Image (cartoon, grey):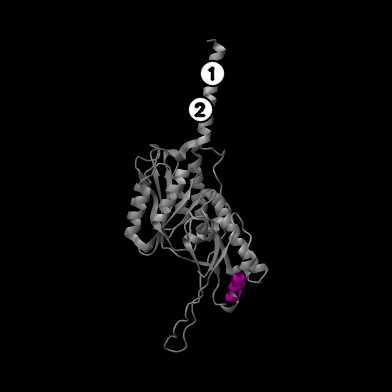
Amino acid sequence: MKKTAWVTLLLILAASLISGCAGHRAAPAQPLEFSPANIPAGQYEAKIDNFQVIIDASMSMGTFNQRDLKTAKNFAATLNRSIPSDLELTAGLRTFGHSDRQSSKLTELVYGMSPYSQGDFTQGLNKIKYAGGNSPLGAALTEAGKDLAGLSGNSAILVVSDGMQMETAPAAAKKIKGEMGDRLCIYTVAIGNDPAGLSLLEKVAQAGECGSATTAAALTSQANMRNFVESVFLTPRTAAPAPAPAPAAPAPAPRVELTLYIHFDFDSAAIRPEHQSELQKAADFLRNNPQIPQIILAGHTCHIGPEAYNQGLSERRANAVRKALTEQYGIDGRRLVARGYGETQPIADNNTREGREKNRRVELQTP
């Protein structure tokens, strides 16, 4: 065979290999950037007492010039800047995987557990420099459970990972949830869009029962970062009750609650005409109960479509209801908290048409 023919054949083979790799996982040129939420001190109280962020520093996070590890660190840094400074929390930062240049341990606590400080958290984050090794998320979760076990109050674990090659993690999450019970919620933030990784991280979050699974791509905006911080860390601050004039305290007023559902057509955020009566009920409830500061407008979708798209669709649905209540019914927008949960919280079977119709909804409810 002539030399030119050999060269041509080698070029074809090389192009085929490159195309195959690109088809497996496309690589954006730069790591994701995030916008910190501006949450002033004094508006919220902490709904948890302790938290630990677990960052994946395994080999798969180091591909494409450590792009995914940089994305994970960017997210953690922005989360750190978004947590109100007046919250009294105990915090920690843990890694797993590791290049030999980073650590010889499967998992390592690089900050905490100690009283939360944004500066100390940043110093811990700056220690994470290299990715490498396997993906022992199960071991990291087990150690996180030990870190939190001796602390009082409620705790949250936030896993930031691509979810790849860590099959023991859901079982480890289920075990520490069984040990800590209602005192623990688990949240996962997926780096990248590998289907197997997304599925595994959803299982880890589901094992925590009261947490949620989302993606880093869904949290790049300031509004979504604020919603995430509120869902994990915060509850609205309520005014202290006035002292009773008599020695005997009056019996507490019965709790007034609201739960309404507005359903949507497939891939739509338009409110159906028949749901105007539900909007009227919500408006009347707020007018008749001025003591209730806010209601939650929780948007949801069925499971059809990419997770990131469904996250955005659920937010558009929640904001459509918020807009209708403010513009059509004159409700103060500060009393309406719109949040999107994508496909993560179904109330019916997504494998049936009827179930999917029920899951395409906005729930109006008191906190």
Camera-side residue: 52 or 219? 219
Q: Dot 1 lies on which element?
A: helix
Residue 326 image-quadrant placement: bottom right
Farthest residue toward the top?
A: 2
**Residue at the disc numbered 1:** 9
| Callout count | 2
Callout 1 amino acid? Leu
Residue 324 lies in magenta, yes or no? no
Farthest residue toward the front?
A: 353
> Magenta segment, principal secondary structure?
helix
Upstream in sequence: badge 1 or badge 2 = 1
**Residue at the disc numbered 2:** 17
Mark-to-mark CA distance, 1 and 2: 13 Å
Report the span colored magenta. Answer: 277-285
Callout 2 amino acid? Leu
Which residue is rendered at x = 32% and y = 59% of the image? 179
The percent coordinates of residue 66 (x first, y second) are 49, 38
The percent coordinates of residue 229 (x first, y second) are 51, 58
Q: Dot 2 lies on which element?
A: helix
Which residue is rendered at x = 57% and y = 50% of the image? 309
Residue 200 visible within the image = yes
Farthest residue toward the right?
A: 327
The percent coordinates of residue 224 (x first, y second) are 56, 56
The percent coordinates of residue 361 (x first, y second) are 55, 61
Indicate whether 183 appears above or below 16.
Answer: below
Residue 84 visible within the image = no
Density class for disc 2 (Cα within 10 Å; few <14, some 14-19, many ≥20) is few
Which residue is rendered at x = 64% and y = 60% of the image? 270
Q: From the viewer's perspective, is 351 left or right of 152?
A: right
